[in-house]
Amino acid sequence: MNPTVSIIIPVYNAEKYLRRCIESILNQEYADFELILSDDGSTDGSGSICDEYAARDERIRVIHKENSGVSDTRNRAMRLARGTYLQFVDSDDWLTPDATRLLVRTAQEQDCDMVISDFYRVVGERVSHKGDIEEDRVMSREEFASCMMENPADFYYGVLWNKLYRRDLVEEHHLRMDVDISWCEDFMFNLEYIRYAERFYALRTPIYYYVKRKGSLAAQGMNISKTIKMKLMVFEYYNNFYKHVLDEEDYEKNRLQVYRFLIDAASDGFLGPSILTGAKKLGDERSRVSQEAVREDGIIMQAYRDRKLFEHYLEPAALKHNLTFNELRLFSYLAEGPRQTTRRQLADLYNITRAGLSVVLQRLASRGFIKVEEVRGAREKEKEKQKEKQKERKIRISLLPAAETVLADLEMADVDYRRARFQGFKEEELQLYLELEERIQDNTRKILQNGSLQRNSL
């Protein structure tokens, strides 16, 4: 049976970084893939590393060839690919563990021809989140092209490695990398693919680590006249793309915007932002996990592991919507409908301070996700021993329509979390577990309720 995804890595003298790249693919949560390592005549140990991994994992296929450039190297791998989708990775970069899972699920659920994702840009020990499209829906070719027009020379649109492609479209229209150019060949392939694709979706979770090491055209030894000629050729192709995608009237309206490409392509920094904005220390871009706690036993460690596992599957939603885990937990609490409670009880539920809870409520309310109202007439008198002291006033919290997309992503996170926990369970084992879990929860409720009644009776 053919794999769902063919992951292609062109390899040339990459022994310093290649193992990290391959390991990030073999450690993917999504396992239905083939990995094609296409060795472009490496003169270091890269070829041996490829063979070593292929001997260990039957999903890996290796191509050894004479040096002919990255375009021909990718083309040969594409001819061998058997997957429904194509995914590209550069040998000195690496993937997040959920990368392929998120790309494939988005493509299948949204019935898309291309999924384009955010990514991390790495410079030394610093990393920043990079993206461009904020749409949370399927886009048509014209809509996607309009987004691209705003930042025509952006890595986000130009490269292969933050996208998922349908292989049948590639084969039907005989799409390949142009071996006659050595600049912007990724972008040229993308423009050609977009001409035939119809449905696009932007995944706003960064799933790829791009390491800034690639050199400019000048560093590649190209002379000025050849550089200018190549850039003009790429622009002409870009210009013709918009003539094909837009009707004549729309093209004329946007012609100056299309011509911005010439300005952006004038420097050797094409497709590469020079400033690392919003940078974090590498390793702090996603939630950390204590490996000691992962290995050790005990009730505290188990509670920690359960929380971290759920946060792992919550993280794409947190990154996509720019929300904290506490904010997402509040969404889960409200998913069944409006809630009446006190700030003290809610803070206790989430194990945060009342000041921290106020920040969460204010931030979600300011973004139009929730509505917080004081419940009038809710004051009651305490027991005589509390000398008529009034209870804290209750509040009612309701979700607003803007929260619907967040709830959908939370529901998917919950599905992923449960699937991960029960992976490998047989049906009868799962049923038995659920029955025992229900009994455990009943025992827990009884103990906590009895303790609460005893305290209230004092």
Image (tube, rainbow, N blue to C red):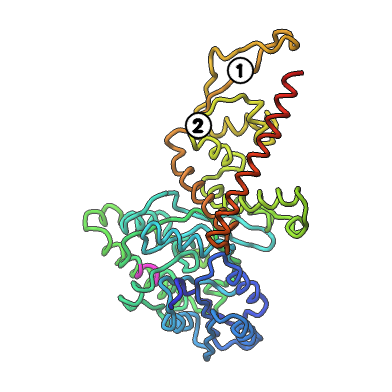
Residue 362: x percent and y percent? 57, 30
Mark 2 and mark 1: span between their CA atoms?
19 Å
Q: Quadrant of the C terminus?
A: top right
Q: Nearer the viewer, mark 2 or mark 1?
A: 1
Of the pair 381 and 14, the residue shown nearer to us? 381
Name the image quarter holding residue 265.
bottom left
Residue for badge 2: 370
Q: Say if the magenta span includes residue 343.
A: no
Residue 288: x percent and y percent? 69, 54
In primary-sequence order, the first of circles 2 and 1 is 2
- Mark 2 lies on a secondary structure that is strand
Of the pair 400 and 208, the residue shown nearer to us? 400
Q: Would you call the spot at circle 1 few (<14 residues within 10 Å), some (14-19), or many (20 or more)? A: some
Q: Is residue 245 above or below residue 72?
A: above
Of the pair 445 and 164, the residue shown nearer to us? 445
Question: Label for residue 2?
Answer: none
> Overall secondary structure of the magenta stretch?
helix
Q: Is residue 322 above or below residue 215?
A: above
Q: Is residue 342 left or right of residue 199?
A: right
Q: Amino acid at mark 2?
A: Ile
Q: Residue at x 52, y 22 (%)?
A: 373
Residue for badge 1: 393
Q: Residue at x 54, y 19 (%)?
A: 374
Bounds of the magenta span? 189-193
Q: Residue at x 62, y 32 (%)?
A: 359
Q: Is residue 4 left or right of residue 17?
A: left
Q: Would you call the spot at circle 2 few (<14 residues within 10 Å), some (14-19), or many (20 or more)? A: many
Residue 399: x percent and y percent? 48, 33
- Mark 1 lies on a secondary structure that is loop
Name the image quarter holding residue 358.
top right
Q: Amino acid at mark 1?
A: Arg
Q: Quadrant of the N terminus?
A: bottom left
